[in-house]
Image (cartoon, helix red, strand yellow):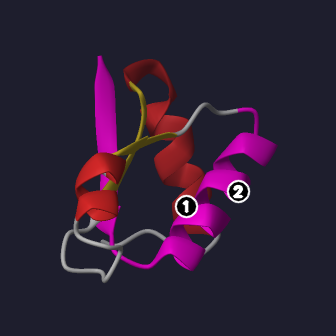
Amino acid sequence: MIRVLLAEADPVRLGFLQALLRDAGLRPLLLDSHVSAVEGRIGAFPQRLAVPENEAAAAEALLREAGEWPG
């Protein structure tokens, strides 16, 4: 199972968040890339950033600590 952390249309921010998670040893997944590519990456359809369920608590804590948690 996976847990979606957030939805984001900004590819720069998505890249930053993925790098942040990877640097912490987590395995982020980017969902909906195909939809974004089809619409020309104009930002109309956000992509979802997810992690495996067993990494979700660590990912949320990391994003919260970095000031990147949406909640």
Res. 71 image quadrant: bottom left
Q: Earlier in the sequence, mark 2 or mark 1?
A: 2
Mark 2 sits on what residue? 20
Rendered location of residue 62, percent (x, y): 61, 54
How many numbered marks, from 0 up?
A: 2
Q: Is residue 37 left or right of residue 26?
A: left
Numbered disc in front, either 2 or 1 = 2
Residue at 31% across / 73% down in the picture? 40
Task: Point out the stretch of residues depicted in magenta.
Answer: 1-25
Q: Amino acid at mark 1?
A: Leu
Q: Amino acid at mark 2?
A: Leu
Q: Is residue 12 left or right of residue 52?
A: right
Residue at 64% across / 71% down in the picture? 66
Asked if residue 32 lies in the magenta stretch, the reply is: no
Q: Are marks 2 and 1 in contact (CB under 8 Å)?
A: yes
Considering the numbered disc 2 on the image, is that residue within a helix, a strand or a loop? helix
Residue at 75% across / 33% down in the picture? 25
Is residue 34 or residue 63 the one in the foreground? 34
Residue 63 — which label? Answer: 1
Considering the numbered disc 1 on the image, is that residue within a helix, a strand or a loop? helix
Asked if residue 15 lies in the magenta stretch, the reply is: yes
User: How far, Cα to Cα, is label 2 from label 1?
Assistant: 8 Å
Res. 39 image quadrant: bottom left
Rendered location of residue 70, percent (x, y): 35, 73
Res. 43 image quadrant: bottom left
| Position above or below: 1 against 69 | above
**Label 2 crowd (10 A; few <14 / some 14-19 / many >=20):** some
Q: Is residue 65 left or right of residue 50?
A: right
Residue at 61% across / 53% down in the picture? 18
Is residue 5 or residue 48 the one in the foreground? 48
Rendered location of residue 22, percent (x, y): 72, 42
**Label 1 crowd (10 A; few <14 / some 14-19 / many >=20):** some
